[in-house]
Amino acid sequence: MWLLVACLCAGHARAEDGYDLWLRYRPLPAAQADAYRGRATQLVAGTSTATQAAIRSELLRGLGGLLGRAPALSDRVTHDGAVVVGTPASSPLVAGLHLDLRGLGREGYLVRSAVVDGHAATVIAGNTDVGVLYGAFRFLRLLQTAQPLDRLDLRDRPRVKLRVLDHWDNLDGSVERGYAGASIWDWWTLPDELKPRYTDYARANASIGINGAVLNNVNADPLVLGHAYLEKAAALAGVFRPYGIRVYLSVRFSAPIELGGLKTADPLDPQVRRWWREKADEIYKRIPDFGGFLVKANSEGQPGPQDYHRSHADGANMLAAALAPHGGVVMWRAFVYANKPGEDRTKQAWDEFKPLDGQFAANVLLQVKNGPLDFQPREPFNPLFGAMPKTRLMMEFQVTKEYLGFATHLVYLGTLYREALSADTMARGPGSTVAKVVDGTLDGHALTGIAGVANIGADRDWCGSVFNQANWYAFGRLAWDPTLSARAIAEAWTRMTFGNDAAVVRPVVDMMMGSREAAVDYMTPLGLAHLMGHGHHYGPEPWDASGPRADWTPVYFHRADHDGIGFDRTATGSDAVAQYAPPVAREFADLGRIPDRYLLWFHHVPWTYRMRSGRTLWDALVRHYTQGVDDVRRMRETWAGLKGHVDDERYRQVASFLAIQQREAQWWRDACLAYFQSLNGLPLPAGYAPPAHPLKYYQSLSFKYVPGYSAW
């Protein structure tokens, strides 16, 4: 029998369905496991709280899986190789070491090699159980990624206070912009049935430092604040609590009318204010550690304070006052725009919120998208970052790939997040990065946050594909520390997901690091944006001018005609560039200095415009579109070379999705070039293949049942 087992293990890795995410804990190679076992022979960990029990369970699970044998449980250290876990308050052994835990705060941790009762040990300590939990996951990550365990001296704490996933899940089980199946919340069976998946969701989030979850769509149904749904939310909060995760709810501003029977939702009306206070009191009776409210107001038809001639600050502060006695926060979205003829949509958030700087209550975070438009494949950073020093600004990223190929395109978003976070606003001089605005260090704010629109659904693999899991992982790691390297995060995820074989790690990381640029090239190169199909956002429709409002149409944004292309946002156009700090504005406005990647975002230029490369703009566009397709083809070739190094089930899924991506990248390239060529009448550069079909063919395509689209 042992021979049969050995033969099976020597062949392909056993098939995996992706459920375990990056917490696979598969057995390490024998030599590596042997080396690590001597450092994990005993586990000294308490279970007097739910979080302590979760820590001990995770360490037993992780060490047992990775090393082939779980450490022995003990209440004291009897020989070398113990792992000692706890806080000074929960563990006499940790208290006796007199560790310097200052500066670690509530969520920080220390992982250190030490001598305990005369024996070599590894100590995982923090000021609270939650800090120790994060330290335990860090220790397991070291083993998963084959890092040395001798002479450990790791200290870490989150740079951002609120690290939150925003679920755009509806109460009917659908998910707006969700590409991984239905909602993971089974509202119908809650609060009675608590699925194991809820606990696994909490484990995954805790492993990367996420500490909050907004359960429902920003286009909120007022029923979520009803008694029945609050009981359901409380049940989920009970599952999440041991893992340091707070529950938040998206609320509809008009709920006092629709749920409370009032005649108004005016934020200055005493009855309205009383209704929200009483609702907050009710919530906190059920969920004592409730995080607060997320609000989308006066945007895309949602009700808000402007319906009563009040400001966004009036609305946010009314809710903040209701939550403040309980320690709750308001996350007020800055994604707003009106339909004013001739007005540049990218300017409207700045125009509405910049004048309100300093008017928001201390427990209000203004949640700002990374770019001024709407989660496009590439945007310049949002000019609100750096422009509101008296207001706490919270970053909003999109983890679900609404504009980047849904579930089937391999697009690693760690590079997008880092591009936005590392952008220099120049608001207080050089080095005033978006990351410093978000983590509060630029303007001295203690209440800080990063939100990510979740890509999680009921699919067995959680995210619709294995590589989409990397974006959830990268979001959490960068929310914890916005300065981390996108490549280092990709490498850690790859090692945890596929193992430490260099023959797999190196090519997979290289694929990931180039994937987002490839998508930009075959979708929206050189600063183009919003070229996708109307409503469903699937596929190219640069010719579309049929939306109910101009600024929902591609033609509004690319402004292509016979002579040129691009949106003039300089002083001769909409002057959106003036919303940036003067040094940034001067760079973006200067054709000689603006980076090529933002050219058509800020400038309308002739097709014959000479790029710094010496090529015409038209030639450069054709080259970028073609380069994107070529890059996907090379990704397919790279993945094909990994056959036999990756388990069959995950290998097949990725291979099939890359085939879809190559076909759709070609579609994007050909449809866009056919349309633009119909306007400019220019030939393609020598050596470049024409579109496979006439423009009318691409214009004839229609799609009725596109994933992830739900009306609100």
Image: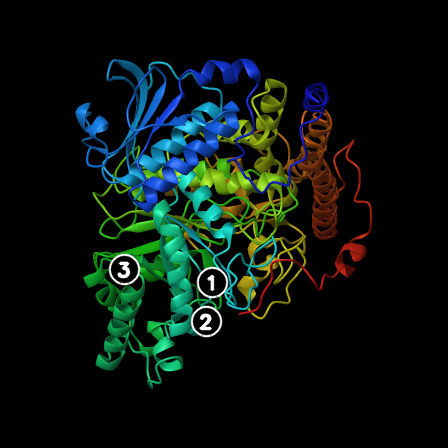
Looking at the picture, which amino acid does disc 3 mark? Pro
Name the quadrant containing residue 322.
Answer: bottom left
Answer whether residue 425 is visible to the viewer in this image.
no
Decide if residue 253 is on the left or right side of residue 630: left
What's the CA distance linking mark 1 and mark 3? 22 Å
Residue 221 numbered tag? 2
Could you tell me if the residues under marks 3 and 2 are in contact, i.e. CB atoms within 8 Å? no
Compared with 213, 300 (above or below) is below
Residue visible at 29% across and 56% down? 289
Looking at the picture, which amino acid does disc 1 mark? Asn
The residue that disc 1 covers is 217
Mark found first going from the N terminus, 3 or 2: 2
What's the CA distance linking mark 1 and mark 2? 8 Å
Compared with 417, 536 (above or below) is below
Disc 3 on helix, strand or loop?
loop
Q: Looking at the image, which is closer to me, 513 or 230?
A: 230
Could you tell me if the residues under marks 1 and 2 are in contact, i.e. CB atoms within 8 Å? yes
Disc 2 on helix, strand or loop?
loop
